[in-house]
Image (spheres, grey):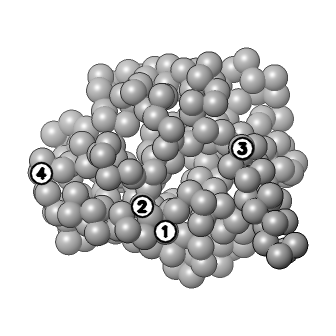
Amino acid sequence: MIRIRAFKSINDIPSSKLFAQGHEQVLRDFGVMKVTSSNMDWIYNPNVYVILVENEDGTKVFGGARIHIADGKTPLPVEDAVGEMDEGIKKKIEQDLEHGVAEMCGLWNAKEVRGSGVSVLLTKASVAKAGAKIANLLNINTLWVLCAPYTVEMVQRAGFKIEDDLGDKGTFPYPKPDWLATVLSLRDTETLNSADPSERDQIFDLRLTPRQSKMEKGPKGEIIIEYDLYIENIENQVYTENQESKSI
C-alpha cells in the first residue's frame, strides 16, 4: 500500500524537501543535471501545492508532482524553461492570469514504483485538485504542463491539448538539445469535457471523495492506494464559506 497526499508546500517543509531530493536524484539518473522545475525555491512559495507519493508512515517518498499557481510576479517553471525560445508562452500565460492559471510540473517517480502506473495516478490527482470544489478559491481555470514524449499521451487522456502554435508544433529542445519536451494546456479544469470519459470519471471520483482507499490497476498489476487529497487549511475554508452562505 502507498499513499498519495496533497498539501501546500510551505505547510510541510520536510516533505517538500524529500520531494525535491527525490526529483533531483531521478534527474541525475537520467543524466540531467538541471531543469527549471527542480529549482528548490518553490518550497517556500505560498502558491505551490504538492501531490506526494509516499509509504504509509511518510518516511519514504516514491514520487510526486506539483501545482504552481501563477501570481503575475514569479514566472511559472515552463516560462523559465522555454520562454527564451518562444516568448509566446509568456504572453499566453499573461492572458490567462485574469481567469486563473497554474502549471503541473516536477512529475517524477522512483525506481521502486516505475512501471506501476504511478505517473498516471499523479496526473489524475493533480487535475482533480485543479478544479471543482476548490477551483474558485485556488482560481485555476487553465493548467499548463511541459512533458517528455512518453508522457504526452498520458496527459492528453486527462484533457490536455498540445499548444501547437508554440515552438515547433508545441515541442522544444529541452532540457537538453537532443531531447524534446511538449507544451500542453488544460483549459476546462472544472468540466473536463476534453478528457477521455473513463479518465474524467476517475478524476471526478477523486474530487468528490478526496480521502479514500482504492485498488488501482497498473502495468505491473494491482496496487492499493490510500488517497489523502484533502488540503486542510484550504478546504476547511471552503467548507466554512459554504456553510455560511447556506445560513444567509
Q: 65 above or below 40? A: below
SS at mark 2 in the image: strand
- For disc 4, the marked residue is 85
Q: Are marks 3 and 2 in contact (CB under 8 Å)?
A: no
Quarter of the view holding residue 192: bottom right
Q: Is residue 112 left or right of residue 42?
A: right
Q: Is residue 20 left or right of residue 226?
A: left
- For disc 3, the marked residue is 233
- For disc 2, the marked residue is 101
Marks 3/4: CA–CA distance = 38 Å
Marks 2/4: CA–CA distance = 21 Å
Q: Quadrant of the C terminus?
A: bottom right
* Mark 1 / mark 3, whichever is N-terminal: 1
Q: Quadrant of the N terminus?
A: top right
Taking the spot 63% from the left edge, 56% from the top edge, the residue there is 129
Marks 3/2: CA–CA distance = 21 Å
Query: How far across and how far down the image is residue 15, in percent?
Result: 63, 24
Q: 150 above or below 26? A: below
In the picture as drawn, the residue positioned furthest to the front comes out as: 248
Give the residue type that dot 4 points to: Met
* Mark 4 / mark 1, whichever is N-terminal: 4
Query: How far across and how far down the image is residue 158, in percent?
Result: 55, 66
Q: Is residue 127 visible?
A: no
Query: How far across and how far down the image is residue 3, in percent?
Result: 77, 37
* Mark 3 / mark 4, whichever is N-terminal: 4
